Image (cartoon, helix red, strand yellow):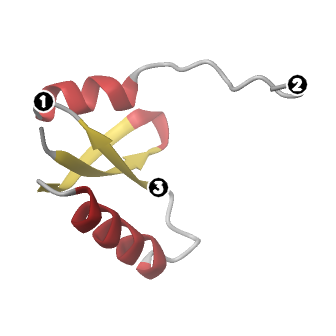
Amino acid sequence: MPYFIYKVFPGKKLEQIAELEKFREAKQQARSLRESTPPTDAYSIKIIFAKNELEAQLLLKEAREARPVGDD
């Protein structure tokens, strides 16, 4: 399964940037993109592991519960 890199805009709008087979390559590219993104831009860079582009988009748009604060 490939790793997808997306720009995630407010309102969960998505723009695919890349699809890579190896995590290390995806991590390096995402890190490089994050470093070159000015803080004034209104999007974040996310990596997602999924079977295909549709599943990646569904996972990124999915509402997730906040992590509990306190005792682990």
Mark 2: which secondary structure?
Answer: loop
- Position of 39 relative to 70 (above/below): below
In the image, residue 15 sits, relative to residue 42, either above or below, namely above
Q: Which mark is residue 71?
A: 2
Q: Secondary structure at mark 3?
A: strand
51, 36: nearer the viewer: 51
Identify residue type, mark 3.
Answer: Ser
Residue drawn 50% across the image and 19% down it: 63
Callout 1: 10 Å neighbours few (<14), some, many (20+)? Answer: few
Q: Are marks 2 and 1 in contact (CB under 8 Å)?
A: no
Front: mark 1 or 3 = 1
> Cα distance, mark 1 to mark 3?
22 Å
Q: Which mark is residue 51?
A: 1
Q: Upstream in the sequence, badge 2 or badge 1?
A: 1
Residue type, label 1: Lys
Q: Is residue 14 left or right of residue 61?
A: left
Question: Within 10 angstroms of label 3, few (less than 14), some, or many (20 or more) residues?
Answer: some
Q: What amino acid is found at the position of numbered circle 2 in the picture?
A: Asp
> In which quadrant of the rendered image does the C terminus lie?
top right
Q: Residue at x 42, y 47 (%)?
A: 9
Q: Secondary structure at mark 1?
A: loop
Specify whether 22 is left or right of 38.
Answer: left
Quarter of the image for residue 20 reads bottom left
- Residue 72: give its label: none
Viewer-nearest of labels 3 and 2? 2
Q: Position of residue 70 (x, y in %)?
A: 89, 28
Please name the residue shown 14% across and 27% down the image: 54
Instruction: Please name whichever residue, 57 or 24, is drawn nearer the observer in this view of the structure.
Output: 24
- Residue that mark 3 sits on: 44
